[in-house]
Image: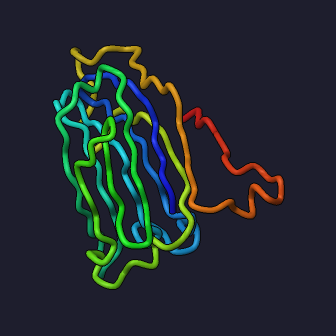
């Protein structure tokens, strides 16, 4: 539980799908969506909106979220505050969606377990569709910073291990 935010500037273009999200650490043992997913920010194609969503398993994939009108081509701070009871999503400090964890209909254990952060920009696929002649290349998701605030120190920090692991996937 805690607060996570990133200040970012996003590209526009058909087939572009930048995202800032969290995935349940149990993905390798329980799979998706049973591990849970928290989409702090997603932007698809040329939409005038950024969005947030929460995904879980309740006899199948269930998700809910909200959109927020914002000029994604300018820097904005996208974030979430996660407690035992709810996840609140905000842009530039304006909370625009609250997800009560009880809405997962008793399937809330995935939101009481560790998650890890991902920042990526997908190109093509089912949701955004594929790039076309109007898609600008190269396209860049600019990240000024990522900040993570926890309610309590973790054993990872106390043991001196890396609390945050950053990887770059060449694929």
Residue nearest the observer in this picture, 3 or 58? 3
The percent position of residue 13, horizontal first and vertical second, equals 25, 23
The structure residue drawn at horizontal position 47% and vertical position 53%, both measured from the top left corner, is 22
The percent position of residue 143, horizontal first and vertical second, equals 48, 27
> Which image quadrant is residue 29 in?
bottom right
The percent position of residue 132, horizontal first and vertical second, equals 23, 21
Quadrant including the C terminus: top right
The percent position of residue 105, horizontal first and vertical second, equals 28, 82
The structure residue drawn at horizontal position 39% and vertical position 18%, both measured from the top left corner, is 139
> Which image quadrant is residue 11 in?
top left
Residue nearest the observer in this picture, 4 or 19? 4
Looking at the image, residue 141 lies above or below residue 155: above
Query: From this viewpoint, which residue is outermost toward the bottom?
Result: 106
Left or right? Give the position of 79 relative to 166: left
Left or right? Give the position of 146 relative to 128: right
Looking at the image, residue 5 lies above or below residue 139: below
The structure residue drawn at horizontal position 56% and vertical position 65%, both measured from the top left corner, is 114
Query: From this viewpoint, which residue is outermost toward the right?
Result: 160
Residue nearest the observer in this picture, 107 or 125? 107
> Which image quadrant is residue 47 in?
top left
Looking at the image, residue 105 lies above or below residue 146: below
Left or right? Give the position of 153 relative to 125: right
Looking at the image, residue 30 lies above or below residue 126: below
Colouring used for the render:
rainbow
């Amino acid at each position: 539980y805690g607060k996570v935010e990133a200040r970012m500037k996003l590209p526009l273009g058909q087939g572009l799908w930048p995202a800032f999200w969290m995935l349940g650490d149990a993905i390798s043992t329980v799979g998706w969506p049973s591990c849970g997913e928290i989409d702090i920010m997603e932007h698809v194609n040329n939409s005038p909106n950024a969005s947030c969503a929460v995904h879980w398993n309740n006899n199948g994939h269930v998700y809910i979220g909200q959109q927020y009108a914002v000029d994604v081509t300018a820097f904005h701070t996208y974030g979430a505050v996660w407690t035992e009871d709810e996840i609140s999503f905000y842009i530039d400090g304006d909370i625009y969606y609250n997800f009560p964890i009880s809405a997962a209909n008793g399937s809330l254990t995935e939101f009481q377990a560790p998650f890890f952060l991902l920042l990526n920009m997908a190109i093509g696929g089912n949701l955004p569709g594929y790039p076309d002649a109007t898609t600008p290349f190269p396209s860049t998701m600019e990240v000024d910073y990522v900040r993570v605030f926890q309610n309590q120190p973790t054993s990872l920090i106390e043991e001196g291990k890396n609390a945050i692991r950053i990887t770059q996937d060449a694929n």
